[in-house]
């Protein structure tokens, strides 16, 4: 890798702690979003390519030039086991930035998943490989690999109004993807567990005959 590329791949940042990631496993994105104060929603068009896919881990951010996937290849080998690649494509959604080969490479590296604001391809094979992929949709249009195009790994990204930093907590399920700032991860995960417990209690009260109007004082 040239000095130019090395200079645009940042390392040594602090990741959300493994025990916090473990506590976040099994929490729903909706619960995390609400418990954190309605935070962290990635563009809602981004969904799991297969329903059983789920991600939970620290973010490794990737700025990909439009229609080019070279920096995704770089990111696979810059990331650590458990990391989730979070990719910005500058609004060039309709390309197949990722497929079977890259999923296999990422799985071999024991990465945690991919969240891309763009398209992917190889639908059936992605399911067979089993590496979790969240994307805007499917597109067979090929990409370039321009060594002179600007890209970056582990720089700040912005998706609509959401800032994503390297090391933030990323959680994705069938409802979508939520990102929690690393500095708030402990707090938000604990609040999420309390919210889940409260909702179980509310559902039990509903089954016993109370109404949502009474419980939430909406009448």
Image (cartoon, rainbow, N blue to C red):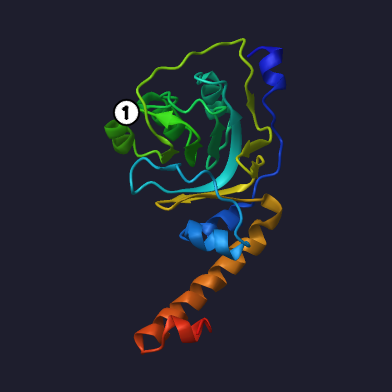
Drawn side of residue 120 relative to residue 13, left or right:
left
Drawn side of residue 4 relative to residue 96, left or right:
right
For this orientation, the residue located farthest to the front is 219
Q: Where is residue 190 in the image (x, y as percent from the top left)?
A: 60, 67
| Residue 157 to residue 27: above or below | above
| Residue 6 to residue 210: above or below | above
Q: How many labels does the image show?
A: 1
Q: Residues within 10 Å of mark 1 (few under 14, many from 20)?
A: some
Residue placed most toward the observer, 159 or 125: 159
Residue placed most toward the observer, 10 or 216: 216
Q: Which residue is drawn at 36% across and 26% down?
A: 139
| Residue 70 to residue 112: above or below | above
Q: Residue at x 64, y 52 (%)?
A: 17
Instruction: Name the element at disc 1.
Output: loop
Q: Where is residue 145 in the image (x, y as percent from the top left)?
A: 51, 13
Q: Residue under label 1, please give it.
A: 122
Q: Residue at x 46, y 83 (%)?
A: 213
Q: Position of residue 162 (x, y in %)?
A: 63, 45
Which quadrant of the figure has residue 101?
top left
For this orientation, the residue located farthest to the bottom is 209
Q: Where is residue 148 in the image (x, y as percent from the top left)?
A: 62, 10
Q: Quadrant of the N terminus?
A: top right
| Residue 170 to residue 148: above or below | below
């Amino acid at each position: 890798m040239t000095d130019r590329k090395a200079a645009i791949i940042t390392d040594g940042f602090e990741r959300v702690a493994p025990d916090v990631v473990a506590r976040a496993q099994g929490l729903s994105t909706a619960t995390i979003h609400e418990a954190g104060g309605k935070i962290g929603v990635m563009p809602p068009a981004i969904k799991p390519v297969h329903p059983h896919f789920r991600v939970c881990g620290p973010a490794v951010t990737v700025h990909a030039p439009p229609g080019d996937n070279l920096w995704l290849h770089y990111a696979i080998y810059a990331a650590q086991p458990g990391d989730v690649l979070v990719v910005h494509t500058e609004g060039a959604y309709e390309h197949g930035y990722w497929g079977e080969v890259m999923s296999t490479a990422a799985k071999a590296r024991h990465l945690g998943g991919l969240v891309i604001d763009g398209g992917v391809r190889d639908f059936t094979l992605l399911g067979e490989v089993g590496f979790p992929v969240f994307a805007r949709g499917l597109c067979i249009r090929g990409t370039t690999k321009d060594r002179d195009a600007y890209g970056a790994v582990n720089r700040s990204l912005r998706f609509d109004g959401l800032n994503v930093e390297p090391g933030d907590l990323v959680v994705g399920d069938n409802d979508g993807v939520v990102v929690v700032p690393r500095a708030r991860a402990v707090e938000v995960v604990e609040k999420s567990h309390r919210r889940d417990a409260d909702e179980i209690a509310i559902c039990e009260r509903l089954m016993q005959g109370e109404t949502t109007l009474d419980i939430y004082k909406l009448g």
